[in-house]
Image (cartoon, rainbow, N blue to C red):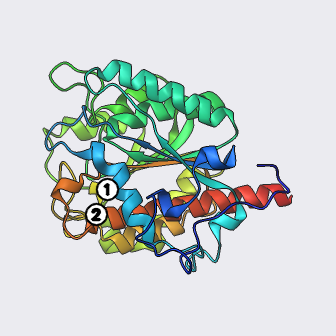
Amino acid sequence: MSSNETPRGPVDSSRVPRYAGPATFARLPRLDEVGRADVAVVGVPFDSGVSYRPGARFGGNAIREASRLLRPYNPAQDASPFALAQVADGGDIAVNPFNINEAVETIEAAADDLLGTGARLMTLGGDHTIALPLLRSVAKKHGPVALLHFDAHLDTWDTYFGAEYTHGTPFRRAVEEGILDTSALSHVGTRGPLYGKQDLTDDEKMGFGIVTSADVMRRGVDEIADQLRQRIGDRPLYISIDIDCLDPAHAPGTGTPEAGGMTSRELLEILRGLASCHLVSADVVEVAPAYDHAEITSVAASHTAYELTTIMSRQIAEARAK
């Protein structure tokens, strides 16, 4: 799509009911139907890196199904994201479920191809292992990036059963590989028991700040968003969201739930407060629909991806207008 072309938006729900037709994200066109996208929504059906309950390989399609109810105007951000930029569903990155190392390489190569077209990525997981190859690819384009990591867990552990690549290790690997800007890293929504106090010590040495779910509750979303904006500044930003940052009441369909999490409203409001940050790509992971009820988790995830997509579309449109 060139800058003077009108983006192709979702299927008109006044003509085709939302429950009819193929479940692309937000009922948007497929990438092969538009040729090129400013924001490519892609799935990664992979959960071989989980340490507890499996099932996140089905998360991307569950999010797509739940996103049927999304509408084209986002009043919270006063924007029509699918009119501001071409957003398209790029389908799934098919990866080897039996070989994690090969899967990581495949995801990185596919992300390289998509980013090489000029698109930003809105990736639907899949387990959190996929964040590492996505960050590798984004860093090739932007250099070391700032990271906001929404999660109940730190995901900066060293290994599980000797394995370097799991859903609990991606951000330690990313720091070791020099693909993160260690002056602008933060976890948001963390809580729950750890293996020991050394987990926090190691995490701090890597450069991470921590905003717990209790911090969000006590200090409020506006103050938290302001703190995060100041930490990020104008650096290229990657946002990685494990849906288990939400309380199990708001996201039961996930692999490693922890009590005492954020509400879906708190998560969405914090993201809206980050609209001025330079968001270069994002992911939403760890939706495991087998443990969901009434699509609670996938609805929350679809709205989360919608807010992230809106931020990227607004920034693309603003850049073109300059």
Q: How many marks?
A: 2
Disc 1 target residue: 243
**Residue 309 on image: x %, y %:** 56, 59
Quadrant, the C terminus: bottom right
* Image-quadrant location for residue 145: top right
Left or right of 163, for residue 185: right
Question: In terms of secondary structure, where does tag 1 sit?
Answer: helix
Please state which of residues 40 and 242 is positioned toward the viewer in this rendering. 40
Marker disc for residue 297 = 2
**Residue at the image position 55 percent from the left and 62 percent from the top:** 274
Please state which of residues 175 and 81 is positioned toward the viewer in this rendering. 81
Left or right of 122, for residue 300: left
Question: In terms of secondary structure, where does tag 2 sit?
Answer: helix
Q: Earlier in the sequence, mark 1 or mark 2?
A: 1
* Image-quadrant location for residue 65: bottom left
Amino acid type, mark 1: Ile
Amino acid type, mark 2: Thr
**Residue at the image position 32 percent from the left and 65 percent from the top:** 215
Left or right of 172, for residue 279: right
Alpha-carbon neighbours of circle 2 within 10 Å: few (<14), some, or many (≥20)? many
In the depicted structure, whether residue 288 falls above or below residue 141: below
Evaluate whether residue 188 shows in this view: no
Asked if marks 1 and 2 touch (Cβ < 8 Å), the reply is yes
**Residue at the image position 51 percent from the left and 65 percent from the top:** 307
